[in-house]
Amino acid sequence: MFNALVVEKDEESGLASASVKQLSLDALPEGEVTVAVEYSTVNYKDGLCMSPKGGGLVRSYPHIPGIDYAGTVEQSSDDRYKPGDKVVLTGWRVGEAHWGGYSQKANARADWLVPLPNGLDTRQAMAVGTAGFTAMLAVMALEDHGMQPGHGPVLVTGAAGGVGSVATAILAHLGYEVAAVTGRPETANYLKSLGATSIVPRDELNETIKRPLESENWAGCVDAVGGAMLARVLGQMKYGASVAAVGLAGGAALPATVIPFLLRGVSLLGIDSVMQPYDNRVRAWQRIATDLPMDKLEAMVQPATLSDLPKLGADILQGQVKGRVVIDVNA
């Protein structure tokens, strides 16, 4: 028997609720690899999956959320993994369409797993999680499109959130001048501790304006907000610079014009972590092991347990979670 956070729907009310329950191994869906999960984390999608209506993500109940997990292989029918191997899983709609990591045991397809890179342990891997993995993919995409240190400040929107926190730390470690956007003034010291050189109040960028172009301010941008802020930022990018779009906390609509693309050669790069090909996953995790300072990573971490998850799920949907929450599923 093992513990898991199980979300169940009440047939009468149609609403779901989450609680820690004991399950047996035969309750797990089929998979090629059985993992003894050690750590998971909390993402916005997890909050949705634990919400009373499942956020439109949960296909069937009962359900185990947790879109990320790291642990040790217990058994495998695939030659790529053997008992004792340390592995990480992010994406592939695990925790949404498939049972996820809020459990002491999980079954997975071998294709979904990535070997834990040298230099990281499973707890650190979940301090990174999908948020940090996405941040690294964004930095890599910006670099692949010509971003280099010394060309000007790089903007990070939603900087106090999971993606923004890791992006700020990585960029600062790589020698970039980081301008961190936040709507929470109380996070300024936290962001500066991660390496941000300046703090940009959210209100300065949150207003839609009629001018399609403003002064060329930013040499790159990791944008977790979308909406009106992304539209505004596009008009402030330096010639030939790129924006990596990783989220839509400010809305899915983009009230922008094509002028920044046509007159300044600005690029808008979409970053998807869910269906990312295996080789690029390995590349990103290897870069994380070398380019994310572990002391900065530790400063982002809030420890928690399975029983803390229902409240944390509600908190993240309200924008009340700072940095990275690491769930010790065995605590």
Image (cartoon, rainbow, N blue to C red):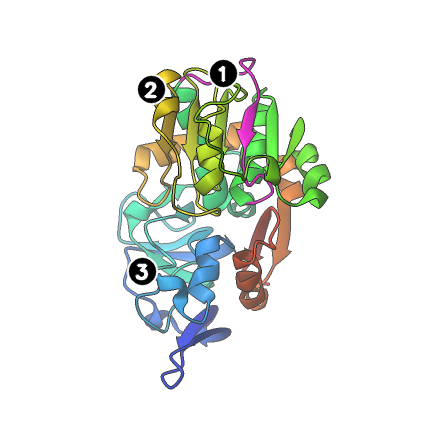
On-image quarter of the N terminus: bottom left
Amino acid type at circle 2 is Leu
The first of marks 3 and 2 along the sequence is 3
The first of marks 1 and 3 along the sequence is 3
Q: Which residue is mark 2?
A: 262
Q: Please indicate, yes or no, whether residue 209 appears anywhere in the rendered image.
A: yes
- Viewer-proximal residue among 44 and 120: 44
Residue 262, given in percent of the width and then of the height, sits at 33, 19
Question: What are the residue bounds of the magenta stretch?
Answer: 146-161
3D distance between C-alphas at marks 1 and 2: 22 Å
Q: Which residue is mark 3?
A: 97
SS label for mark 3: loop
Q: Which mark is residue 148?
A: 1
Residue under the point 33% across and 53% down: 93
3D distance between C-alphas at marks 1 and 3: 39 Å
Against 251, residue 234 (above or below) is above
Q: Please indicate, yes or no, whether residue 330 appears anywhere in the rendered image.
A: no
Residue 100 highlighted magenta (yes or no): no
Graded by Cα atoms within 10 Å as few (under 14), some (14 to 19) or many (20 or more), the crowding at tag 3 reads: some
Residue 327, given in percent of the width and then of the height, sits at 56, 57
Amino acid type at circle 3 is Ala
